[in-house]
Image (cartoon, rainbow, N blue to C red):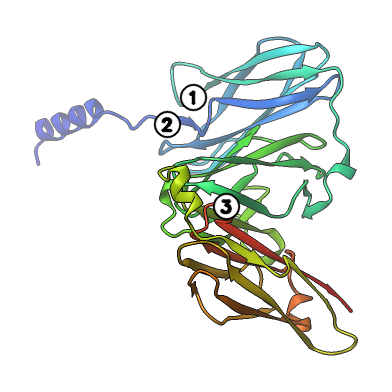
Amino acid sequence: MNRKTIITSLLMMAMLPVSAQRLQVTKTTVNCGPVAYNRPITAVFEMRNKGNRKLKITDVRTSCGCTAVEYPKKDIAAGDKFVMKLTYDARQLGHFDKSMRIVSNGSKEPLYVNMTGVVMAELKDNAASYPFAMGDLLLDRNELEFDDVNKGENPVQDIRIMNVGSTVFTPTMMHLPPYLSAIVTPEQLSPGHSGKISVMLHSSKLHDYGLTQTSVYVASNLGEKVSSDNELPVSAVLLPNFDGMTDAQKLYGPKMSLSAESLDFVFDGKSKKSGQIIITNNGRTDLKISSLQLFTAGLKVTLGKRELKPGESTKLKITALRDELEKQRSKPRVLMITNDPDKAKVVIKVNVKE
């Protein structure tokens, strides 16, 4: 290779674009939700050096003196993740929107991030209102039940949560089936603050009438392991729709009656107890029990007949198993779905004592 070729090659290499370092942030705005007056609140911004060289943050400025920042002073290697924190002193009531201007050697333009929320004079964060603990995340309930849902409805239930830890949480709900969705407010939960998880049931995605059960998992932060410690059972009861029936059709329809709507069992040292309920069709057309389900383990049921002609009766036998019931979180109940417009859903309560 002659000298001219070498010089030409060097010039061409100099003209090739250099891959710029880039400062990437997961979310540019963090909604802190309600904040207690004079209790500093911290927003955590997850960052990453997307470039192929070391990144250096050269200057950080905030929108006012009421905020403080934390950020790495050392070089950040290519591909590494890190966090920057913006803390607001919360000494002024009302809504707030505070920003942070970040300058680095990874871009000619600064990067702006924001924290928002509302400072309130009183914020009732009473730990006694959150009786269930999943680590340092407290909850006001440890199960969800969507009862009496009609096809097409989208009911929502809220779980109130509180952070009693020493670090900022990003609560999340894991292993949601297609018929459930969840929104966490605020997205980041500072120590001593509360929020909520709003869970929506999309009933159009349920395939069968009656009881559908699953378990979802609540985590303080994304990536936590799934275990029985953070399990939250969810149940939904989808009812048949009788809106298309006329009053005359309902009058001449089936009429279900029960000898009892609950059973009381006292084990007295025994491992199981049984009882029975008489089901009668007092209507003018056939009574059909389309679904017979259990809300919990620890029960066994047998039903003599699922279809009863007018005037007919059958026996529902329920057996309670002591050792299995002791492991259950929910109350033992039996569910029946029928074609009686006035008793589409029938729940038999099972009360047990030692």
Q: Amino acid at mark 1?
A: Asn
Out of 185 and 155, give the one closest to the viewer. 155
Q: Are marks 1 and 2 in contact (CB under 8 Å)?
A: yes
For the C terminus, give its image quadrant.
bottom right
Q: Is residue 262 visible?
A: yes
Q: Quadrant of residue 324?
A: bottom right
- Separation of disc 1 and disc 2 at Cα? 7 Å
Q: Are marks 1 and 3 in contact (CB under 8 Å)?
A: no
Q: Residue placed at 75% from the left, 74% from the top? A: 327
Q: Quadrant of residue 127?
A: top right
* 1 or 2: tag closer to the N-terminus: 2
The numbered mark at residue 152 is none
| Label 2: which secondary element | loop
Out of 301 and 297, give the one closest to the viewer. 301
Q: Amino acid at mark 2?
A: Gln
- Separation of disc 1 and disc 3 at Cα? 71 Å
Task: List x then y, in percent, for residue 293.
Answer: 57, 69
Query: How packed is label 2: few (under 14 Cα within 10 Å), some, or many (20 or more)?
Result: many
Task: List x then y, in percent, for residue 234.
Answer: 61, 56
> In the image, 60: left or right of 20?
right
Q: Residue placed at 45% from the left, 46% from the top? A: 248
Q: Is residue 23 above or below residue 175?
A: above
Residue furthest bottom as drawn = 270
Task: List x then y, in percent, for residue 52.
Answer: 40, 39
The numbered mark at residue 105 is 1
* 1 or 3: tag closer to the N-terminus: 1
* 3 or 2: tag closer to the N-terminus: 2
Task: List x then y, in percent, for residue 13.
Answer: 22, 32
The numbered mark at residue 21 is 2
Q: Quadrant of residue 125?
A: top right
Residue at the spot of label 3: 342
